[in-house]
Amino acid sequence: MAQAAAVAKAPRTRRRTSATPRRLPYLLIAPAGLLMLGFIAYPVLSVFYYSLQNYNPTKPWRNGFAGLDNFVTAFTKDPDFWSTLGFSLQWVVVQVVLQLLLGLGLALVVNQTFVGRAMARALVFSPWAVSGVLTSAVWMLLYNSQTGITRYLADLGVGTYGTSWLSDTATVFPAVVTAELWRGVPFFAILILADLQSVSKDLYEAAEVDGASRVRQFLHITLPHLKDAIILSTLLRAVWEFNNVDLLYTLTGGGPAGETTTLPLRIASIAVDSHDFGYASALTSIAFVILLFCSMVYLRLSKFGGGEK
C-alpha cells in the first residue's frame, strides 16, 4: 500500500517541479513589469481622467466633471487648435524628411574607407550627445543679432545690422529647422550606419561583376536592406519631433506671432501659464490618439518587419 501511494504521488510531484521552471522567468520580470506598468499606465489614465474634468487649481469653484466639453471646445471653439496642429504636422514632415535624407547621406559617406574616418564619425555623431538645452543655447548665440551670424554677414555686406532671424516671420521657420537638423541628423546617421555594417560585401561584388552601376546597387541592395531601419527611425523621430518643446520654447517661445507654436508647446503653455489642466489634458489625449493612429497606419502600410533583407 505504501509503495502504491508513493507511485500515485510521484506524477503530481514531477508535474509540480516541472511547472516551476516555466513560471520562473515570469516571476523574475514581474517586479520590473509592475513598475513599468505603474509608471506608464498611471500617467496615461490620469491624463484621460483629467480630460473629462474642469480642473484649474486657481479657480477651484469651477472644478468638476465636464464630460466631453473640453474636446468640443478644442474642435469647435479654440481658434488656435487647428493652426498649432497644422504647424505640428508641417514641422514633423519637414524635419523627418530632411533628417532622413541628410542622415542617409552622412551614413553612406562615413561608411566608406578613408583616412580619418574615425574622427569624421565622431564629428558626425557628436551633436546627438549634446543635450537639448545646450543645443538651444548654442543656436541662440549663433542667431544673436549683435554677436551671431547676422552680425558677420552684415560685416560682409550681406543684410543689415541688428537683424534677428528668430523674430522675423519670413526667416524664423528656416532658422529653427536648421537648428533642429543639427541635432536630429546624427540620430538617422547612427542607426543607418549600424545597419550598413551588416550588408554583405559579396552582394556588391556580385553586382559589380554583373555590371550594375552604383545607383542600381544603392536602389536594389542598400535600400532594401535598410528598409526596417528607415521605417523604425522615421517613426521614432516623427513621434519625438511632434512632441518637441525644448528647442522651440527656448529659441522662439512659439513666436513670433505664434508662427512656431506646436500643439505640445500650446499644451505646455495652457498647463503652466493658465493652470487649465483639464483642457490641457484633453489636448494631450487628442495628441496621443493622433500619434497612436498614425503610428499604426504607418507600420501597417510600410509592412515593418515583414520582408526579408
Image: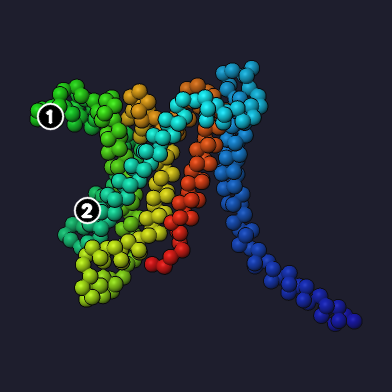
Instruction: Report, in whole angstroms, how far the alpha carbon at label 1 lies from the one at label 2.
Output: 31 Å
- Residue 4 seen from this side: yes
> SS class of the residue under badge 1?
loop
- Residue 183 seen from this side: no
> SS class of the residue under badge 2?
helix
Most foreground residue, 170 or 285: 170
Q: Which residue is identified by label 1?
A: 158
> Relative to 33, is 180 on the left or the right?
left
What residue is rendered at 26% in x and 75% in y?
A: 206
Q: Which residue is identified by label 2?
A: 120
> Relative to 60, is 135 on the left or the right?
left
Task: Mark 1: give few (<14), some (14-19) or many (20+) Cα within 10 Å.
Answer: few
Residue 172 picture location, percent across and down: 28, 30
What colour-coding does the image apply?
A: rainbow
Quadrant of the image occupied by residue 44: top right
Quadrant of the image occupied by residue 164: top left
Looking at the picture, which amino acid does disc 1 mark?
Val
Most foreground residue, 24 or 81: 81
> Relative to 44, is 239 on the left or the right?
left
What residue is rendered at 16% in x and 22% in y?
A: 161
Looking at the picture, which amino acid does disc 2 mark?
Ala
Quadrant of the image occupied by residue 66: top right
Sequence-wise first label, 1 or 2: 2
Most foreground residue, 41 or 257: 257
Quarter the C terminus occupies: bottom left
Residue 78 picture location, percent across and down: 49, 25
Above or below, comparing residue 263 to residue 35 in the picture? above
